[in-house]
Image (spheres, helix red, strand yellow):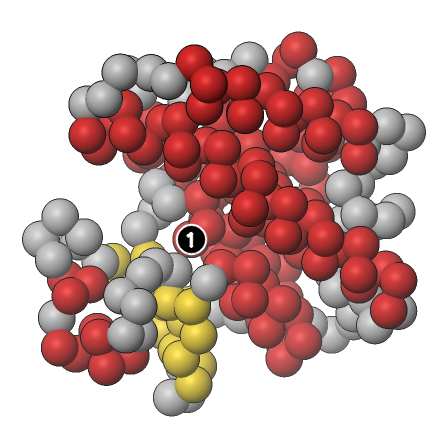
Amino acid sequence: MVDFYYLPGSSPCRSVIMAAKAVGVELNKKLLNLQAGEHLTPEFLKINPQHTIPTLVDNGFALWESRAILVYLVEKYAKTDSLYPKCPKKRALINQRLYFDMGTLYQSFANYYYPQVFAKAPADPEAFKKIEAAFEFLNTFLEGQTYVAGDSLTVADIAILATVSSFEVAKFDISKYANVNKWYENAKKVTPGWDENWAGCLEFKKYFD
């Protein structure tokens, strides 16, 4: 049994849901109410001392950090290696995109939107510029490409799709970035679990309405 501690609105959690769908793993989903402090209970701290979501527990093996979970699910459960190929160069490119998502793209989302949403802080124009720069980079990566890393769908597309869909519900104008927009429209059609991802996005959207 694969237990999955999550919130549906969280894009890192949504990326894991899509990856699990892609490899055919059924998740035993356990909602964590962060506002009620459910991530700080002694029981959860024993599973994940960092008390973050998403957290996966696979027959007693606990793992957190969504991008690490994506790779684990593919390496353990996928019937082929297409989502995370064994070729060192292909894998290196996917890793680069995963780290780009974590440290640049998703980070820019968190830095700009979370203070406004959760701390009622004013919008920071400098943080917004970081979002625009991140999308410019992604737009460049996607020049002449259908997928973000290589010539087929990988975990890098899944991670970045979860992030970009969060930008959509936050009303960021993705259409200004033609390559990203084209990739996004295709990724929505070809990524398993997109419907559940979008349902989570709509739950997250209430913070922006």
Mark 1 = which residue?
13
For the N terminus, the image quarter is bottom left
103 displayed left or right of 208: right
* Left or right, residue 91 beside residue 134: right
Which quadrant holds the C terminus?
Answer: top left
Image mark count: 1
Q: Please state which of residues 36 and 133 is positioned toward the viewer in this rendering.
A: 133
Local secondary structure at mark 1: helix
Q: Residue at x 86, y 60 (%)?
A: 90
- The image shows residue 104 at horizontal and vertical percentages of 57, 39
Q: Is residue 89 left or right of residue 19?
A: right
Query: How far across and down, in percent of the image, does residue 2 sit?
Result: 42, 76
Residue 10, position as x, y percentages in the image: 38, 45
Residue 128 in the image: state x and y as whole percent.
Answer: 48, 19
The residue at 20%/63% (across/down) is 39
Q: Image check: 99 left or right of 186?
A: left
Q: Residues within 10 Å of mark 1 (few under 14, many from 20)?
A: many
Q: Amino acid at mark 1?
A: Cys
Based on the displayed image, in which of its 4 quarters is residue 70 positioned? bottom right
Kindly identify the residue that appears in the image at 35 percent across and 41 percent down. 9
Residue 191: image quadrant is top right
Considering every residue shown, the one lying at the far left of the view is 36
